[in-house]
């Protein structure tokens, strides 16, 4: 099997992803409110306050998603953020977490475990990737070449 050809795409913020994240935040807040009301004690309301604070802290990140550049060179993936073009791209591997045909959720796992290169979740869609969509799908689904273990030295029966 041949390796997928090199591909480079810009991962732009996606309306569907934003709606899904906002819906998930709304559901989590609703569940926390219902749970706190049913529990009726200070612990329930304390958890509710923590959920609201967590959503407020996460909100700016949800509203301002940076454009990222994802590149496959035939061996490894490179991920860089448009805001930080001066920094070198993180090198790692990409795994498909969810594939819905015209929309995928990718997980970028950096090769180094430094704090600067953390695991990233990348929602991508045909709408935001454009003409490179097919090449990206081929690259993320291509089988990675792995070292083939040596055959045992003894006779095979």
Image (cartoon, rainbow, N blue to C red):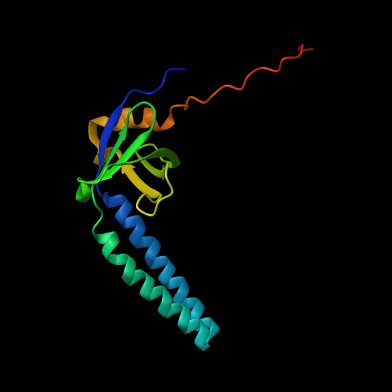
Q: Is residue 77 above or below residue 58?
A: above
Residue 47, image x, y percentages: 47, 78
Query: What residue lies at 51% left-to-right and 77% top-to-bottom?
Result: 35
Q: At 23% across and 35% down in the image, what residue appears? A: 130
Residue 140 quadrant: top left
Q: Is residue 63 above or below residue 32?
A: above
Q: Residue at x 72, y 15 (%)?
A: 153
Q: Residue furthest bottom?
A: 41
Residue 136: image quadrant is: top left
Q: Nearer the viewer, residue 32 or 52?
A: 52
Q: How many marks?
A: 0
Residue at 42% across / 66% down in the picture? 27
For the C terminus, give its image quadrant: top right
Vertically, is 47 above or below 135?
below
Image coordinates of residue 86 in percent, x first then y, are 20, 46
- The quarter of the picture where residue 94 lies is top left
- Depth check: 64 or 24 in front? 64
Q: Does residue 106 lie above or below 138 as drawn?
A: below
Percent position (x, y) of residue 30? 42, 72
Q: Position of residue 95 (x, y in %)?
A: 44, 39
Choose between 62 and 91: the one closer to the eye.
91
């Amino acid at each position: 099997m041949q390796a997928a050809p090199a591909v480079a795409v810009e991962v732009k913020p996606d309306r569907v992803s934003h709606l899904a994240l906002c819906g998930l935040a709304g559901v989590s807040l609703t569940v926390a409110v219902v749970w706190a009301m049913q529990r009726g004690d200070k612990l329930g309301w304390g958890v509710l306050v923590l959920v609201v604070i967590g959503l407020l802290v996460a909100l700016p990140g949800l509203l301002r998603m940076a454009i990222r550049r994802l590149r496959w060179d035939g061996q490894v993936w490179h991920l860089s953020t448009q805001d930080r073009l001066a920094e070198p791209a993180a090198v790692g591997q990409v795994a498909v977490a969810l594939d819905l045909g015209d929309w995928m959720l990718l997980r970028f796992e950096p090769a180094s475990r430094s704090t600067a290169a953390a695991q990233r979740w990348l929602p991508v869609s045909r709408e935001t990737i454009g003409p490179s969509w097919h090449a990206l799908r081929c690259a993320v689904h291509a089988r990675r070449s792995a070292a083939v273990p040596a055959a045992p030295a003894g006779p095979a029966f």
